[in-house]
Amino acid sequence: MNAVLRLLAQRIALGAGSLLAVSVLIFLGTEILPGDVAQAILGQAATPEAVAAIRETLDLNQPAYIRYFDWLGGILQGDLGTSLANRRPIGEMIGERLQNTLFLAAVSAAIAVPLAVFLGLIAARFRNSWLDKSISIATLSTISMPEFFVGYVLIFIFAVTLRWAPSLASVYDSMSLGEKLYAIALPCATLTLVVVAHMMRLTRAAIINVMSSPYIEMAELKGVTRSRITLYHAFPNALSPIINVVVLNLAYLVVGVVLVEVVFVYPGMGQLMVDAVAKRDVPVVQACGLIFAAAYILLNMTADILSILSNPKLRHPRS
Amino acid sequence: MTPLLEIDDLRIEGQSEGDSWFEIVKGVSLTLKRGEVLGLIGESGAGKSTIGLASMGYARSGCRISGGSIRLNEQELFGAPHETLRKIRGVRVAYVAQSAAAAFNPAHTLNAQVCEAAVTHGVMSMDEALKNAKRLYAKLRLPNPETFGDRYPHQVSGGQLQRAMTAMAMVCKPHLIVFDEPTTALDVTTQIEVLAAIKDAIRDEGTAALYITHDLAVVAQIADRIMVLRHGTLVEEGPTGQILHEPKQAYTKALVNVRRVEGEATHRESGPPVLEARNLTAGYDRSLLVLKDVSIALESATTLAVVGESGSGKSTLARVLTGLLPPIEGETVFAGETLSRKLKDRTKEQLRRLQMIYQMPDVALNPRQKVEEILGRPLTFYFGRSGAARRKRVEELLEWVELPRDFAQRYPSELSGGQKQRVCIARALAAEPTVIICDEVTSALDPVVADGVLRLLLRIQNETGLAYVFITHDLATVKAIADSIVVMYQGEIVQQGPKAEVLTPPHHPYTDLLLSSVPEMDTNWLDAVLAERARRKAQGEKVLDSAGL
Amino acid sequence: MRNTPLSAWFGFTIIAIYAFLAIFGPWIAPYGESAIVGDVWLPMSSEHWLGTDNLGRDILTRLLYGAQNTIAVALAATLLSFALGMSLGFLAAVVGGFTDQAISRSVDVVMSIPTLIFALVVLSVLPSSTLVLILVIAVLDSTRVFRLSRAVAVDVAVMDFVEVARLRGEGLGWVIRREVLPNTLPPLIAEFGLRFCFAFLFLSALSFLGLGIQPPAADWGGMVRDNANAVSFGLTIPLIPAGAIALLTVAVNLVVDWQLNRASLLRGRA
């Protein structure tokens, strides 16, 4: 077990390291402008007094590294800073929206993951049949479409023409779970479609890859039944790549959710971040960016950890 | 009594690009009696593995059985429903693959996989199957038969895994086992152990076998009869003794006569060494040395053979000599100059005079360059030749390595393996070197082709006075071409000296093991070697076997 | 070409039509790029084949101009991303050692931030000019190109023929150009299609969020954004530019998919 523990420790340390590096990068991302940030935020028409005020708020008179450590120190203590646009603490602005975003992402994932794995298994099992080919063309098309196209098509069909679901996904605290689920039906469907397409294609590839291993041929030559080959010989080895595919594709949710929230005017983090970019509210953008990036890194780390744990060569080391 | 297996006019097709089918096996017939061992021999592409799998009613994807009949115990397998075939496989007929490491499922223990067929087919209970498996482990001379099978495939060595796979095939006591190159991937000292274990097990269990291999000397130890195949058709068939001693067809004669190339015993004047390695120590990490204090000396116009098995450090030696891997200690002296440790610090002239030829001609030639470009580049690079002068020299080089001039316009993919290796030789010659390092240059070639390449190298040496460092695991090749020999084991030199001295007893124990493990074209070789080892052990002599390594 | 499936032919045809429209669009377009020619959201008619948009501009005209703007920016970003990603990838693969580690780890860090999120962070201080868009998309996307070209080149760089060239004393440039590059082209060509799709979708997404190509220049993502409200009135206007985006990426993907399948089929045979 030592080898596994060591690998896990390494992977977690790497995750923490990436998180730190990413925080630097996000901070630097807003520093790459050659000129004055305050001027850029306010535009050319700004008065010198306004520029000076912004410089004061952002502490621009301090060197960059000091501001970075102040920012990072604040975050570690749970203080995400203050918005430029409305002077409110960012933590307060994000709190509820983060919950909404997580709710949308979680519901989508709960539908998408089983669906994608099931479709991937079917496509791999009936490889090269008409069923496989039609699933393949359908998912390829879905991957190729921008999220907002899928979103508006769904709105047009289900909200405007059929009137089955609301086109704007507004949720409030006072709503019951059922009402909330009804409200997010369309954004959730949009996200699910996009994620399923990616996930299903890679699941299919992972299973086909395992099925072409020599030990599968060996099992066939031992007269093992097809179902036993699938369950006993292929599945334990396909598990690790499938877990990897599933978790990595959940990362599409991180990006997809931003666009879908804008399409459906959903009160989540994505919407908040896009608005903040338009208003050049840099502290809010940084905070949102860091949270999205952290979610993404966490998912990647989970994928690697699960795949380490499901590797038989690591679980049973050479004595 | 009816034969166990009757294959009649078997035809198998493979799929080419664009969905058209072409024949791989073109009407082969064979019969196999109960308990008989039939050797199928031929070079790569002869269709022998395909025939072996077809005898189980199986065709790989991209292949299909298109005609003829396959009868096992009078039951027709061609066109039989999948369920019928499934019930026969593993019970009546079993398979042993070339690469055991790939054929075992990494997710389950050896016991689980060895016993699987017996239990799932309902032949035995799990307890009975386990008992039988342990009996077979013992028979196949696996260590600790009681607990051996509790391990996972990646926890045991390659030679052990190959024997475990034989146990897996035998667990249901099948009538027929198909052995598909079971020892090809193993080192020669391991091969002899596995071969002996398989031979005893087949005899004791009374199983019939199809033994597929490209090595006539190996199959001679085990087969009652041999069929020689080439390009999907039968060349010759007969009892093992007859094939070995009275082959009728020219192709069979060539197969029997391989490894009998002899370097002319020219008496060369021994001058100062042209290439000398002094106390080389190297590794990819200081704590993991691959080469320990190795010194060799190569005299001009001679061949120094470096022999060893995988992990002996022989290929690392080549990398250090060429400068690809800078040594941790020691130095290389070439034509009186001490070479820089690193490749990039060596002069163009030094690089030119030390050339290298590789094991796999497929990956040693850039597939996107024509032969003219491949051979022409060193001419331009070292001698500044271009245009007509370069073209003329390319044609001379091709002729020198016995290839037609118009090959200059071909791409490597349009050449056979042996032709590619000749182009590689020509490329080395284009630099007009004094020393060529040959790294396993014949190992990837079929035996008859390999012989041709060896003869060519010898001829070139006689014509030009080149010196070779010849790195190989194949002692037959060493016997054929070496002037002096270096035997390596685990990064160290265990013995070195002139050929006659190293090959004549008394040997170093490892050299002895290595030499005695090389299969010979003699049906009694295996038994004789094992008997000799047993006799000497009984007399208390120090004798290594691969278990003792 | 005999065995080219229908789907690939469909893809080729669509790509050819788009290429034609992107080049000659402005000459074909019936009106000026941002000329207001009628009422808001007019239905399809003989004067305005696809109707008018939220400001009363001709949609067909906007679509044709948009083709040029959108495709040109995406193509420029893809080309730049390949130039950058391939040079770094080949360098890392052939030189190896510390150089490889340094570049690979930096790319890892950049890749651990989702592309769109990183772009949003950067665009919060940078102006959304065409040049900035091309640079941002190219730099972020080049990480993917780097990964693939490094992987492919590492496979080639360990081949003996590359070692032969190094032992001969050839320089780094020659080794990369003559030995490695020609053998890495087939997978990279397929990747070019995929990366173009990505850049194109990415640009459209940014424009849709109002951070891409800036008005009054026509651009498909921006057209979707401008006319998004029309959907609530049962109008299909935003679906037209969105569909135009989807159709091109589907077409490119169909061709790439066929290429990749063919390559894996040939590999399986070898």
Image: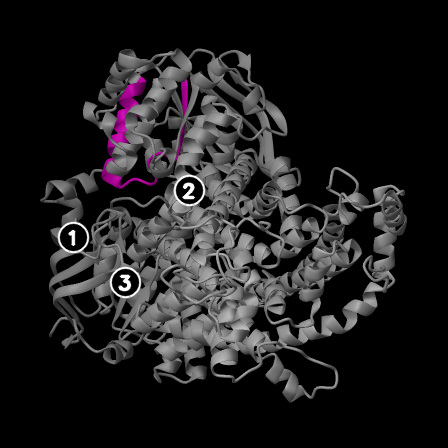
Q: Considering the image in quadrants, where does the N terminus of chain A appear?
A: bottom right
Residue tagged 2: B514
Q: Quadrant of residue B181?
A: bottom left
| Depth check, front residue: A132 or A45 | A45
Q: How was this image coloured? A: one colour
Element at label 1: loop
Camera sees residue B141: no
Chain ID at mark 3 = B
Crowdedness near tag 3: few (<14), some (14–19) or many (≥20) residues, C-alpha within 10 Å: few
Q: Considering the image in quadrants, where does the C terminus of chain A appear?
A: bottom right
Q: Residue at x 31, y 56 (%)?
A: C8
Q: Quadrant of residue C210?
A: bottom right
Q: Is residue B455 magenta?
A: yes
Crowdedness near tag 2: few (<14), some (14–19) or many (≥20) residues, C-alpha within 10 Å: many
Residue tagged 1: B232
Residue C97 in percent (x, y) is at: 61, 36
Residue tagged 3: B60
Kindly identify the amino acid type of the residue bearing the numbered disc 1.
Answer: Gly
Kindly identify the amino acid type of the residue bearing the numbered disc 3.
Answer: Arg
